Amino acid sequence: MLTHYLLVAIQFAGIAFFVITGDSYPQNGVVLAIEIVSVVVGVWAILAMKLHTVTVLPSVKKGGQLCTSGPYRVLRHPMYTAVLLLLLAFLLNNYSHLGLVVFVIVLVDLIVKMNVEEKILLSHYSDYINYMSKTKRIIPFLY
């Protein structure tokens, strides 16, 4: 369980880095578009999952059900997609080598977190294996 908290701490530290060190106001249309897509995907994922079952930890809340609607029809981890898109927008908006390193750290952290979470989901939901075969992790049609 300590690993779960460490994974979340790394994720939030990366987000905090970009919020504290960069200008979040979009400098061009591409950055603005990425930010908008990020927010839409993130909010859509939360609404589809139902707010009372959302957790930042790689775990299943009591009474939780496998969500396969909304963005979860295509992606198993749309909230991670939203986080990565937002951080990509922040990185592009205010590029630095350190920012790139932080982005890669968060990316690796989320991949590890997905692996941990998917093991939990496989043990909790008997139809998760079937769901995995029909969806991608964070990038539609690719990964």
Image (cartoon, rainbow, N blue to C red):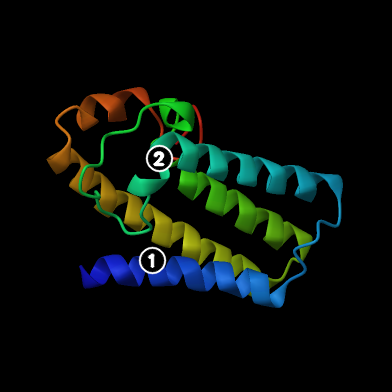
Left or right? Give the position of 64 relative to 107. Answer: left
Residue furthest toward the right? 28
Q: What kind of residue is marked 1?
A: Val
User: Is residue 6 depicted above or below 91 in this figure?
Assistant: below
Is 138 on the left or on the right of 125, as rendered?
right
Q: Residue 135 in the image: state x and y as whole percent.
A: 38, 27
Tell me which residue sits at (28%, 65%) in the image.
4
Residue located at (56% from left, 67% from top)? 15
Distance, label 2 to label 1, CA atoms, is: 20 Å
Q: Secondary structure at mark 2?
A: loop
Residue labelled with disc 1: 8
Q: Dot 2, how many residues are within 10 Å of its Cα: few (below 14), some (14-19), or many (20+)?
A: few
The residue shown at (80%, 61%) is 25
> Residue 50: which numbered mark, if any?
2
Q: Nearer the viewer, residue 81 or 48?
A: 48
Side of 105 relative to 60 (left or right): right
